[in-house]
Amino acid sequence: MSDISFVIGKPVGEEYPSIVKSNVESKGISIDDAWVDYCHEILGRFIDTSGENLLNRTLSLALGKNVISPKTFLTYRMLTVNGQARSSPVLMLLSGFCNEQETGREVQITKEATEYLSAYLGESLKAESIEVVVATPLINEPIFHNADEWRANLFNQNSHDCSSAFKNAINNGNEFPVVFLIDVRDEIGAILAKSLNGGKDINDFNTFIGTASFDTFKKIISILEKRTGFDLKAIKPISIGDYRSLTAVIAADGISYFDAQI
């Protein structure tokens, strides 16, 4: 089974709930960001494992058997619409973790089940659309033998969004931007993401994509060099000409560099 993402569209008729409009004013954030926060709060209850797991129940109804839902995480997708960056909330089901409760055998999430779940999410969130994105099937699910492989996979999953972030930064006048793709489940990653996010916590996301100037990038690297236990192998002098679009992936207590092909 491949990863499945449910990309949540705007509310029907762009009639945003009152709490979304209130958060725009009280928190000084965009309507998109407020909508992402709102959807993540609702979806967080949906996937909560501390009580009745609504995701388990919904998939069990769709598949006709009692199942334990796959591993999930909440993230967002950045798109450029008419020259404007727009963010959409995303619920991702990770591959290989949907098991039958009685036998423990893996259960394939069928197309019909994704359509059922998509309809349920759309109705619950009053969303105009739910886009279902299925990752390209692999002959064998990847096995990560080291942190470098994990960072490479994280980049492959988010390369489109990293490229979009780079283009947006260029369009906004940042002549030499660096894209940061950060796993905020890492302690150092959470600290860096908060700094790049204007001091705001990244509570609802497992990954953060942001941009900074090349000078800021060099300052961050100098800080990482002083961190005990951080994987320093990839930290090396980098010039602006080394990459067309530099993406620094910080995860698994280390850093890897990639050139997003734009």
Image: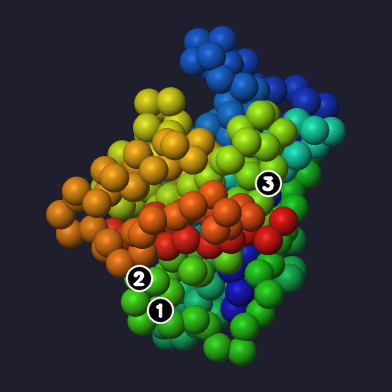
| Near-viewer residue (127 or 65) | 127
Instruction: Give the colour scheme of this rendering.
Output: rainbow
Q: Residue 147 shows which numbered tag? A: 2
| Near-viewer residue (60 or 18) | 18
Mark with earlier residue (2, 3) = 2
- Numbered disc in front, either 3 or 1: 3
**Amino acid residing under circle 3:** Ser
**Residue 33 spot, x, y in % from top left:** 59, 29
**Amino acid residing under circle 2:** Ala
Crowd tier of the residue under label 3, counting other residues whose Cα lies within 10 Å: few below 14, some 14–19, many 20 or above: some
Crowd tier of the residue under label 2, counting other residues whose Cα lies within 10 Å: few below 14, some 14–19, many 20 or above: some
Residue 166 in view, yes or no: yes
173 w.r.t. 119: above or below: above
Q: Residue 144 shows which numbered tag? A: 1
Mark with earlier residue (3, 1) = 1
Disc 2 and disc 3: Cα gap in Å?
A: 25 Å
* Residue under the image location 35 percent in, 42 percent down: 220
79 w.r.t. 247: above or below: above
Disc 2 and disc 1: Cα gap in Å?
A: 7 Å
212 w.r.t. 106: above or below: above
Quarter residue 87 falls in: top right
How many marks on residues? Answer: 3
From the image, tell me which residue sits under label 3.
164
> From the viewer's perspective, is 74 left or right of 134?
left
